Amino acid sequence: MTTDHDTARQVVVRLDDVHKEYGDAKALDGVCLEIHAGDAVAVMGPSGCGKSTLLNMVAGLDRPTSGTVEVQGHDLGELNETGLALFRRRHVGMVFQFFNLIDDLPALDNVALAAQLTGTPARQARRRALELLDELGVADRRNNYPATLSGGERQRVAVARALMNRPALLLADEPTGALDSRSGEQVMDLLIDLNQMGQTLLIVTHDPELATRCASRLVEVADGRIARQSVLEATA
Amino acid sequence: MSAVWRASRAAVKRRRLQAFVIGLVVLCSTTTVLLALGLLDVATSPFDKAYAAQRGPHTVAAFDPAKATPEQLAQTARRPGVTAAAGPFGQSVLDVPKGWLWMPGGSLRVVGRADPGGPVDRVEVLEGRWATAPGEIVVAWPSAGTPGTELLGTTLEVPGSAPLTVVGFAAGMGKSADAWVSPEQMTALRPATAQMLYRFSDSATQARLDAALARATAGLPEGALTSAHTHLDLRKAFSSLADAYLPFMTLFGVLGLLVSALIVGNVVSGAVVSGYRHIGVLKALGFTPNQVVAVYLAMTAVPALVGSAAGTLLGNALAGPVLRIAFSGIETGRAAVGGVSSWVSVVCLLGMPALVVLTALVPALRAHRLPTARAISAGSAPLTGRGLRVQRVLAGSRLPRAVSMGLGQPFARPGRTLLTLAAIVLGVTTVTLATGLTSTMLAYSEAGRGGGALVRVEAGGPDNGRAAPLLGDARIEERLRSLPGAAGVRARALAQVTLVGQSRPAFADFYRGDDASSAGRIAEGRMPGAAGEVVAGPAFLTQNGLRLGDRVTLALGGRQTSATVVGELIEGNARALEASWDTLLPLAPDARAVEYEVRLAPGADARAYAAAAEATDPGLRASVSDAGNTATTTVVAFSTVFTVLLSAVASLGVFNTVLLGTRERRRDLGMLKSIGMTPRQVVLMTVTSVAGVGAVGGLLGIPLGILAHRLVVDNVGVVSFPESMKAVWDAPQLSGLLLAGVAIAVMGALVPARSAARTTIAAALHTE
Ligand SMILES: Nc1ncnc2c1ncn2[C@@H]1O[C@H](COP(=O)(O)OP(=O)(O)O)[C@@H](O)[C@H]1O
Ligand SMILES: [Mg+2]
């Protein structure tokens, strides 16, 4: 990778001196970070150091106390609640540790939901949802309710939902944290595949294996600050 | 216990809004229940209550003093079955001339009593004082209010004795005498009868009263008892209006109780059910099942106690004015309708928390049995059956996804949805009933009040003690007609006639002239048009056993004429009938009108007309009549109070249901927002989730309300409404009511929906 190449790639995320305080507690304490298109960034650090908070800032799920967050050229600080919702719809997909699927909807409708919110007709949304479930290997589970899926299956449905609107940025907060090692591995492989197809990734984890296998860059956080950044060798 | 207490305190703290809503619902419900119970309490038996308060006699007996000595009569008071007695008092009948005080003349039943109090028949002195010396008399005032002091000092000539001076006016519900004098004066009047007043332990029926009297007088010589009358006769004569409103008031009372109990149950059980996950965590921590139940009971009981105490206070503060307004339309005679008895407050204060704890107990016990693992995963239990299919269909529909998700939500929690539905149905039923009654009552008060103001011009005469007019009857009518502003004049004569075959006299009004105002007063049949036709109110007809088409014979001063009942009025005094002037002519050929009702042209100045009318003849008195119907006030006031309270309770119930649902779905909402659901879509979804239920509730509640309205208007005995006043429903009004159902639901949903839309997603998702 040359320097030229680096600057040519589009900046997807730019955090500038971001602070976040909950009352007296400082969750983020002056974070600066840039993520380019096609990057796979892993955020690591001990529990409570501010990883999820950082991710929430990027997703526009929460607002910084000070500093600016720019994603795909949008300054999130200038968007109101509705603006943020529309921004998330178009630009980011999120995967959570505990899946956060809707219990009352079968897998297919959980995935289709993301597109339907934007007004895509049900038929079309379901067609794309089925394609995604198929790509992720859980198409046969499309009529199952979340409660009857295994953890790995639930997380793959969640990934499918996150990808539904073709986001520029896929955010994942401890995506394997609630999974056994085999399911975790499958989800990891899935993320690697996605990145190789050009999907920009920001993954929060404290699993060093996940970080080294999936990521091209490693960001280490401690006490709300970025302690170290390193570029990883691309895996074979 | 301290862990339990700490856990429940923490639970209440974290669910502050929920605790507040429980408290508020209990407060409103307690107020409603208190008013409802107070109303039922007062309305059940206003006569009996007031009568008991005055210790009115169950039986007033007259004895022949020649056959039984005073000692023998006093003995009867100590017989078994007699709880209290007074007497013997001397009783004598005096003749009074026509026009003495307010009386039509005739006889006056005078009793000698040393004081108005005593164990039985406490007589209330309204004006002046009690008769204590010879030559003094106290006269009974027969109606509500007081006669004023001007008439004190009036004297009554007594043949063969010194005249009596009126020193006071008094009233007793027992109607044991027309006037009272001191015992010394009574001796001077040579009493022909001895009066005993009894209260018996068993006074429910005529037969039991007869038996009790027979037992009390068993030891007396043959023929000593000459006559007796019982409180049952008085009760029958007591304004039947009070009874007429009973179905109406009872319905509101029962509705209030029902809605309140239902909503409290809904709110409380909802609170417990939504806490299942929390219950699982407590159990995992090592709380015993009983401790878990205790936490949940404490959690609901604390706000309930606060709410019921505040509600009892508020209810008591409201009860006085509300009941006064409610009964202002009902002639209760001397029976005063005051505040609410204290037992009602006690019932509310203890009953409402008990109800809350009881309703909390059912789901809490279910939680008691719930396995910990299932409780923890309570939220994620898969749905089964029909609910799923509905979700599927909705997910595939063309509706915006926020709307179709909202519509699907009620099917996810069918139990809670049913409770909410019940709350809305009852709310809408109440609103429907109240609007219907209000419309009927407004139509009723409009009847006979078309056009401009009404001026009553009263002619002086022996009945009111004023100078008679100088002009003749026909001349007066003609003058009144020609005064500016008059649109119609109707002359009225009043006569006390006898219905041949009936013991009680009837008051008959005879009308002449324009009768524009009679339109809409007839419930069935028609107004009298020709000679020999009479109409009367339902009370008169029932009490005399008359129906339309029946013939009666009217007698007055030795003359008779026969007449046919051609119509039933909407309402009317139980002793009054109406006929046209032509019917009066054969009875009293030279009768004069006592009053002229002048209907003014719309916009005409009523005061100016009244002044001009009085200037016509010194014997005329004019007054502007604004007969704001007091019965209407009663119904409208009551409908309003209960509608407001019940709507508040129903809305709070719905509010709470949606609040709980929203809280339960916090994580889902956070997730939906994370995938791009806008705040507007969140509100839309939450509101649609209840609007559907609201619409169904409206569709069910409206027919129920119409039915209830029918039931009420058909059973208000003294007022028999014509069909036109019962059919008050039309399409715009009904759709308005349907909207009311949806509005109640949406109002309840809007606040939690807004707050759900505003919660930070990060915080919502953090709850995991
Ligand atoms: N909603 C919140 N309210 C208060 N404090 C919070 C909230 N979210 C996170 N924190 C605090 O911020 C710090 C960082 O949290 P988080 O970003 O979740 O850490 P992690 O690195 O484990 O994901 C922690 O000390 C946490 O307690
Ligand atoms: Mg975290």
Image (cartoon, rainbow, N blue to C red):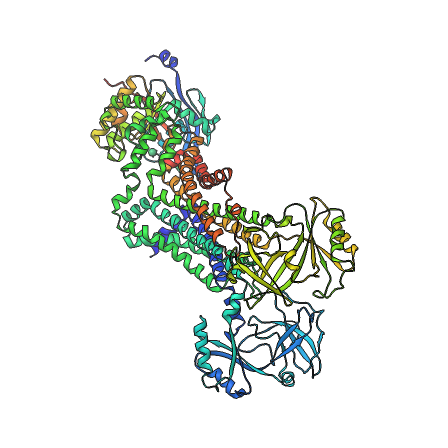
Quadrant placement of the C terminus of chain B: top left
Considering depth in this image, is B64 or A189 the residue closer to the camera?
B64
Considering depth in this image, is B533 or B88 the residue closer to the camera?
B533
The residue drawn where x is 55% and y is 81% is: B87
Asked whether residue B310 is in view, the answer is no
* Ligand 2 quadrant in view: top left
Q: Is residue A37 left or right of residue B593?
A: left
The residue drawn where x is 49% and y is 69% is: B232
Report which quarter residue A18 is drawn in: top left
Q: Position of residue B327 (x, y in %)?
A: 55, 58
Q: Position of residue B700 (x, y in %)?
A: 41, 42
Image label count: 0
Report which quarter residue B577 is drawn in: bottom right
Q: Position of residue B196 (x, y in %)?
A: 53, 80
The residue drawn where x is 36% and y is 13% is: A3
Q: Is residue A20 left or right of residue B617?
A: left
Q: Position of residue B708 (x, y in %)?
A: 45, 49
Considering depth in this image, is B90 or B653 the residue closer to the camera?
B90
From the viewer's perspective, is residue A90 above or below residue B57? above
Considering depth in this image, is B542 or B629 the residue closer to the camera?
B542
